Amino acid sequence: MDIPWWATGAFWAGIAISAVIGLITNVFTNIYNSKVLDFLENRKVITHEKRRSKAMKLHKIITDLHSGKRDKTHYLVLQCTSIVIAFTATIACFSAVMVILALSPHTGPIDFSNTLQLQAFVSMSLLTLFAYFCLTVAIIHVVKLGRVGTAVENFEKYEKEFKARWGERQIH
């Protein structure tokens, strides 16, 4: 005898469990709605303040470079030095990974019971993660240097956009 799907106990148990979970979720949502909204609003304000603070610091650097208070050559040398160091660290890490890979014994898939293979795998993984971190730092510095350079060259346009976004009263 074939029982239709809607007549089984599992179907109705699923409906009952869904109804109970939905009711509980509805009650908790109504109780904690204002607290969650307040938390999200505070988070939004904090994020906005952090962005504004970073923008103000960058604006100060650009203004100082444009007015001559800060030496452009010194700033460029510091930024380029950090970029070169980060790229050099990236290349060194990837070279070390290649050396470890060339010198470690290969017997097929990685056998985690073999401590030598495990050490080689962990070393290569950590070096690769550090290399990607250094590469990310270098790229961030290159982008920042490009933005600062463009803003100093086109200072009037940058100043106008900055005032439009952050307001005149928050600049000084």
Image: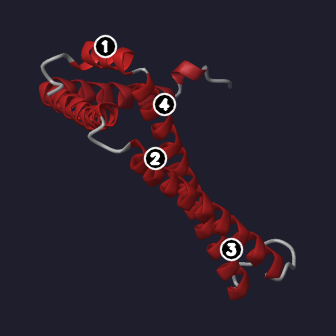
Q: Mark 3 = which residue?
A: 121
| Numbered circle sitting on residue 160 | 1
The residue positioned 20% from the left and 32% from the top of the image is 49
Q: Nearer the viewer, mark 4 or mark 1?
A: 1
Residue neighbourhood size for the residue with mark 2, other residues' Cα within 10 Å, grouped as few (<14), some (14–19), many (≥20) = few
Q: Earlier in the sequence, mark 1 or mark 2?
A: 2
Tell me residue 134's x, y (percent).
54, 57
Question: Where is mark 4, residue-wise?
Answer: 9
Q: Nearer the viewer, mark 2 or mark 4?
A: 2
**Rendered view: 123 above or below 10:** below
Q: In front of the other: label 3 or label 2? A: 2
The crowd level at tag 4 (other Cα within 10 Å; few <14, some 14-19, many 20+) is few
Q: How far apart are labels 3 and 4 at the CA level?
A: 52 Å
Local secondary structure at mark 2: helix
Q: Are marks 3 and 2 in contact (CB under 8 Å)?
A: no
What residue is shown at x 30% (from left), y 29% (from top)? 20
Say whether disc 4 or disc 1 marks the residue closer to the N-terminus.
4
